[in-house]
């Protein structure tokens, strides 16, 4: 199937979904259980098609970029690149040997390569069982090599939520970083008469401090038989497991964290409006419109929505006074775009499963369930020196090896006026 055919197939599914909603509305009733199940099935199929379309379009865009690339790489530059790739490949081979067999199963060259990356985690910060695993005076772990770290960072971003929408700020070390803040949207210039001096208007600068809070993956247990099986892709399995666990815990704190001794969540420190009585699990067209226009036009230029998948399901069923859905799928009309984006009231959205749900049967009473704003004013800081520990002796009698990853991260708003929230009513 071509990309265009996939787009047309998705458009047909969405039209059928709308027809089911319209049928229920015409009869002034809720959808039946059978209709709801059919709607959910088509919604899942439409989401899968969207993912396939996005991947194809990204590949096609990259292929076009390669075709129109600039001057060829010089021989000297190619040698540097190849040297870097050779070093990275050696590093990854040493890394996999350590994952599978531990220090004892590595060659002297591989040990030398990994020792240059050895993590200097303070042993006082580790559990007693982990400290007992020290090898050659270290804490028993290694800094994750570049190749594995790059894949893990991509996975964390693909995990979705706030990381996908926020401004990423990776740093090589974990020291506190002051970030300047300013909001000049209320200040104006002036009209001057001839020979009249200009007045001054100071800009009020502030700052937020980006910290580096430590997160753990908890221990991942892998059997020795699997580690010794060369067909077992240990790198991919660990990346997925560590990415899932670290992605979920950091997403939770980067969404609802208080900002005191933990990251500040994107729902914290901003203002918004609460739904009227009776809107404990719903939102209306007018409430979404009010939320959209509560954000200054300066920030709406970069604006997008954020909510959970269950909330999206509810919004997809809302129509305006003319019966037109607020949710609009990307279709053949937007085929020229490189990336497929569905919209609500003309703006894209991000799914964040760490946000409170809103919808029939959801526990969203009184919770912040929808955000709209410029999430590039929200900073996600990751310290790139991730560490992985290999726990061999602790689980030896079970024929298992434990892996434990640490990462450090923080998140903060640098402009709390750039985003507003909708909060469900308490009753």
Image (cartoon, helix red, strand yellow):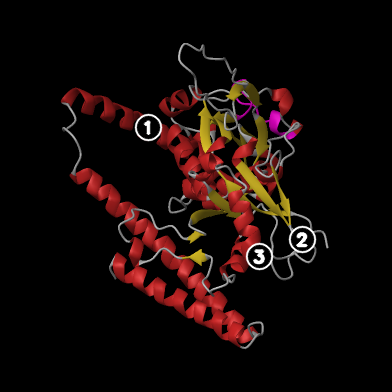
Image location of residue 174, percent across then percent down? 60, 24
Dot 1: within a 10 Å radius of its alpha carbon, few (fewer than 14), some, or many (20 or more) residues? some
Labelled pair 2, 1 in contact (Cβ < 8 Å): no
Image location of residue 58, percent across then percent down? 34, 52
Gap between marks 2 and 3 measured at Cα: 10 Å
Residue drawn 41% across the image and 37% down it: 93
Query: Which secondary structure lies at badge 2?
Result: loop
Mark count: 3
Query: Which secondary structure lies at badge 1?
Result: helix
The image shows residue 15, relative to residue 412, as above or below, that is below
Provide the residue designation for mark 2. Answer: 276
Q: Which mark is residue 34?
A: none
Q: Quadrant of the N terminus?
A: bottom left
In front here: 326 or 353? Answer: 326
Q: For the residues carrying marks 3 and 1, which lies nearer the camera in this image?
A: 3
Residue drawn 48% across the image and 57% down it: 346
Q: What segment is highlighted magenta in the picture?
A: 129-140
In front here: 4 or 421? Answer: 421
Provide the residue designation for mark 1. Answer: 88
Q: Quadrant of residue 206?
A: top right
The image shows residue 70, relative to residue 137, as above or below, that is below
């Amino acid at each position: 199937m071509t990309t265009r055919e996939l787009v047309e197939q998705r458009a047909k599914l969405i039209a059928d979904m709308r027809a089911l909603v319209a049928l229920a509305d015409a009869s002034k009733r809720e959808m039946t259980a059978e209709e709801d199940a059919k709607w959910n099935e088509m919604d899942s199929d439409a989401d899968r098609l969207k993912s396939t379309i996005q991947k194809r379009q990204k590949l096609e865009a990259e292929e076009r970029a390669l075709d129109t690339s600039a001057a060829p790489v010089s021989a000297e530059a190619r040698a540097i690149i190849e040297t870097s790739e050779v070093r990275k490949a050696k590093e990854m081979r040493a890394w996999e040997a350590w994952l599978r067999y531990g220090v004892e199963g590595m060659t002297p060259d591989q040990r030398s390569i990994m020792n240059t990356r050895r993590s200097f985690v303070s042993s006082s910060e580790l559990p007693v069982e982990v400290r007992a695993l020290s090898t050659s005076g270290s804490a028993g772990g290694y800094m994750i090599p570049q190749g594995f770290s790059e894949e893990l960072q991509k996975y964390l971003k693909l995990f979705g939520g706030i990381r996908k929408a926020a401004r990423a700020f990776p740093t090589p070390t974990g020291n506190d970083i002051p970030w300047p803040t300013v909001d000049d949207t209320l200040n104006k210039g002036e009209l001057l008469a001839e020979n009249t001096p200009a007045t001054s208007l100071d800009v009020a600068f502030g700052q937020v401090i980006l910290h580096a809070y430590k997160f753990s993956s908890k221990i991942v247990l892998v059997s020795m038989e699997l580690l010794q099986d060369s067909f077992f892709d240990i790198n991919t399995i660990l990346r997925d497991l560590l990415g899932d666990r670290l992605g979920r815990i950091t997403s939770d704190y980067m969404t609802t964290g208080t900002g005191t001794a933990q990251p500040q969540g994107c729902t914290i420190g901003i203002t918004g409006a609460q739904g009227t009585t009776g809107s404990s699990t719903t939102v209306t067209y007018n409430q979404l419109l009010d939320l959209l226009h509560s954000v200054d036009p300066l920030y709406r230029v970069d604006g997008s929505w954020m909510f959970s998948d269950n909330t999206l399901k509810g919004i997809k069923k809302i129509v305006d006074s003319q019966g037109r859905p607020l949710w609009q799928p990307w279709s053949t009309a937007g085929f020229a775009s490189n990336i497929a984006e569905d919209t609500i009231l003309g703006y894209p959205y991000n799914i964040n499963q760490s946000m409170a749900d809103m919808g029939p049967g959801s526990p969203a009473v009184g919770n912040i369930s929808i955000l709209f704003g410029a999430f590039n004013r929200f900073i996600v800081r990751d310290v790139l020196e991730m560490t992985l520990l290999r726990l061999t002796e602790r689980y030896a009698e079970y024929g298992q090896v434990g892996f434990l990853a640490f990462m450090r991260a923080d998140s903060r708003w640098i402009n709390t006026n750039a985003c507003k929230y909708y909060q469900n009513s308490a009753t």
